[in-house]
Every structure is written in structure tokens, then in C-alpha cells.
């Protein structure tokens, strides 16, 4: 009886331990599921907010493009069919893509919505893309100095090597257009350091160009040689060969 009692005592203790472990696992699983669900919902909300911000920018650019587009001639009479059928060609916001603008003043709604995405949804993919979009918006419209802060945030928050390389390259271009050549070189080198194969050619050419602009001909030539040897028969190699020849 004593042995039997000891057996059942151990069985009860083990059962309680087993039950406690099961309860703990269920609780942890439920917690992880809840967190993942909240994270998914936040990402979806960020993506929706980002979409609306892009639509706002598109609307503002389209309105500006339409205001500048030539108007279709008005019909002088109802019988003037050729003129009456004339229509204004469709207007695309792409026509203003690289035009110098006062981004904050002329694209206010879209810019404010993008900034809201970066603040409200920090850490999400949507926030990364909003930072990148803001940087590119300022850069493409002639305000590279304003692009720097946003592209810097994008580069630091990129989750993949492709995202990081893309942002570092964009940041380098913004620094370069702002006249900050050393900072540009550092950004291009960081893009190269990600190891992202797709960005390698542009990153190497940008590094070489930065050395060239900084009057370091030896490093520029050496980097052009890297492009030629590591990316043979590519457009990058052809560009490097031409740039290197121009240094001679």
C-alpha cells in the first residue's frame, strides 16, 4: 500500500507538472498569436495609409499638370465637328516628376500623409517605404538637402539587403547633389557593403565617381578596374571603361 501510494503521489505530481507545462505553452502560443495578429493588422493599416498618401500626391501633381496643359480649342459652331470632337490629351503627373518644385508648399497633403505614416507606423514596411518616398520626392524635385534626413531613416530601417542598398544609394545621390561628396562616398560604400548583387554595379560606379570628384584619381581608377573585372560585358563595365579612359 505504501508503494502504491507513493506511485500515485508521483503520478499526481507529474500530472500537475505536465498540466502546468501545457497551460504555459498554450498561454505563450496565444500571446504570440495575439502579437502577430496585432503586427499584421498594423502592417496592413500602414500599407493602406501609404497607398492613400501616394494617391494624394498623384492628385496634387495631376492638378498641377492639368493647370499647365494646353486646352482643347472650343467649337465655333455645332457644325464644326472636327473642333467639337477635339479633346485635351490625358495628363500624367509623370510630366512633373523631375521638375523643380517647392515640395512642402505644392504637395502639402501628400507630404503630410507620408510623414504621418513614418510617425504612426514606425518599424513597419510601410514606414520604410514612406521614408524612401519622401526622400525621393524631395530629391526628384530639386531639394536634395531635405531628402537626406528621410533617406537616412530609410537606410537605417531597411529590413532586407535590397532595401538597405536602395536607400543607401539614394542617400548617396542626395548628398552628392547637395555638394557633400565625402558623405556621399560613405553612403555609396555602405550600399556596396550590403552585398546586394543587384546594386553592386551602380554602387561601384558611384564610389568611383565620388573618388573622381574628390580628386583622388588613383582610387577612382582602381574602382573602375573593379567594375571592369567583376562585372565583365555589362553596361556597368562599359561605363567604367569610358570613365577610366577619360582619366588618362
Image (spheres, rainbow, N blue to C red):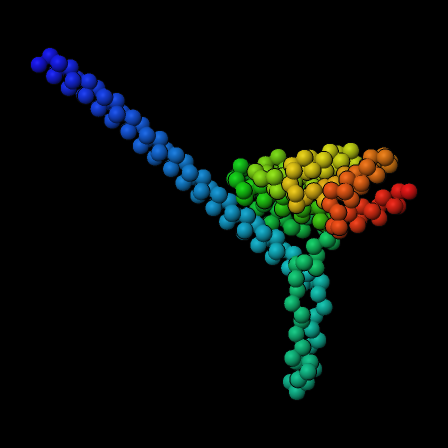
Residue 115 position by quadrant: top right
Q: Give the residue furthest to the right.
A: 248
Q: Give the residue furthest to the top.
A: 2
Q: Give the residue furthest to the left.
A: 1
* 220 relative to 77, above or below: above
Q: Position of residue 119 (x, y in %)?
A: 55, 38
Name the residue at 75% across, 47% down. 232
Classify the position of the C terminus by image quarter: top right
Q: Nearer the viewer, residue 186 or 131?
A: 186
* 130 relative to 21, above or below: below
Q: Position of residue 140 (x, y in %)?
A: 71, 49
Q: Is residue 218 visible?
A: yes
Name the residue at 65% across, 36% down. 194
Q: Horizontal placement of 211 versus 58: left or right?
A: right
* 60 relative to 113, above or below: below
Q: Is residue 178 visible?
A: no
Name the residue at 31% across, 32% down. 26
Name the residue at 67% across, 51% down. 106
Q: Nearer the viewer, residue 57 or 225?
A: 225
Q: Nearer the viewer, residue 144 or 163?
A: 163
Q: How many marks?
A: 0
Classify the position of the N terminus by image quarter: top left
Q: Nearer the viewer, residue 193 or 62?
A: 193
Residue 131 position by quadrant: top right
Amino acid at each position: 500500500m505504501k508503494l502504491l501510494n507513493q506511485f500515485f503521489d508521483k503520478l499526481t505530481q507529474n500530472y500537475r507538472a505536465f498540466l502546468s507545462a501545457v497551460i504555459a505553452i498554450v498561454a505563450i502560443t496565444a500571446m504570440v498569436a495575439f502579437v502577430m495578429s496585432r503586427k499584421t493588422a498594423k502592417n496592413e493599416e500602414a500599407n493602406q495609409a501609404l497607398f492613400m498618401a501616394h494617391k494624394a500626391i498623384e492628385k496634387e501633381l495631376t492638378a498641377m499638370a492639368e493647370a499647365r496643359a494646353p486646352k482643347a480649342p472650343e467649337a465655333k459652331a455645332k457644325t464644326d465637328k472636327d473642333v467639337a470632337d477635339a479633346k485635351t490629351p490625358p495628363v500624367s503627373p509623370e510630366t512633373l516628376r523631375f521638375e523643380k518644385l517647392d515640395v512642402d508648399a505644392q504637395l502639402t497633403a501628400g507630404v503630410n500623409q507620408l510623414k504621418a505614416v513614418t510617425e504612426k507606423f514606425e518599424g513597419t514596411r510601410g514606414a520604410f517605404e514612406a521614408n524612401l518616398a519622401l526622400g525621393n520626392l524631395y530629391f526628384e524635385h530639386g531639394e536634395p538637402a531635405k531628402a537626406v534626413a528621410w533617406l537616412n531613416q530609410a537606410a537605417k530601417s531597411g529590413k532586407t539587403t535590397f532595401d538597405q542598398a536602395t536607400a543607401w544609394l539614394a542617400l548617396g545621390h542626395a548628398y552628392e547633389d547637395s555638394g557633400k561628396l565625402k558623405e556621399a562616398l560613405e553612403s555609396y560604400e555602405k550600399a556596396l557593403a550590403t552585398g546586394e548583387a543587384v546594386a553592386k554595379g551602380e554602387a561601384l560606379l558611384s564610389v568611383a565617381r565620388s573618388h573622381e570628384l574628390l580628386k583622388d584619381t588613383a582610387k577612382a581608377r582602381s574602382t573602375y578596374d573593379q567594375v571592369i573585372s567583376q562585372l565583365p560585358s555589362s553596361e556597368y563595365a562599359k561605363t567604367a571603361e569610358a570613365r577610366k579612359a577619360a582619366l588618362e
